[in-house]
Amino acid sequence: MSYKEKSLLYFTALVTASIVYYQAETKTPDTQDIQNELVRMEAPATNSQTDQILP
């Protein structure tokens, strides 16, 4: 293979790897996001409509 063909092949491989890595990163939620979601689920509901209706 000529130098041009090798360069194009390596460039294509690099771009492909970058795209695959980016897609994998965007589909996997961050650990911090998961912890925030768990805290939100465990937090008691305050200032909800039921608190205002009940005496």
Image: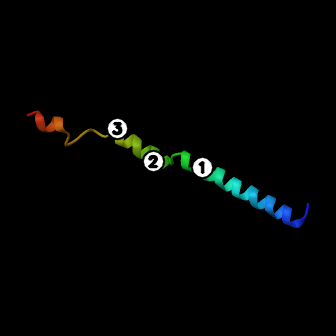
- Looking at the image, how many numbered discs can be counted on the residues? 3
Distance CA(mark 3)–CA(mark 1): 30 Å
Distance CA(mark 2)–CA(mark 1): 17 Å
Task: Relative to 51, say whether 17 is above or below.
Answer: below
Helix or strand or loop: what does disc 2 sit on?
A: helix
Task: Relative to 13, say whether 44 is above or below.
Answer: above
Mark 1 burial class by Cα count in 10 Å: few <14, some 14-19, many 20+: few
**Discs 3/2, front:** 2
Quarter holding the N terminus is bottom right
Which residue is found at the position 34% from the left and 38% from the top?
A: 42
Checking the image for residue 42, the label placed there is 3
Task: Kindly identify which residue carries mark 2.
Answer: 33
Which residue is found at the position 73% from the left and 58% from the top?
A: 14
Task: Relative to 39, say whether 4 is above or below.
Answer: below
Residue 23 drawn at (x, y percent): 60, 49
Specify the quadrant of the image occupied by residue 4.
bottom right
The amino acid marked with disc number 3 is Glu
User: Please, which colouring scheme is shown?
Assistant: rainbow
Specify the quadrant of the image occupied by residue 43.
top left
The amino acid marked with disc number 1 is Gln
Helix or strand or loop: what does disc 3 sit on?
A: helix
Checking the image for residue 23, the label placed there is 1
Which residue is found at the position 16% from the left and 37% from the top?
A: 51
Residue 32 drawn at (x, y percent): 46, 49
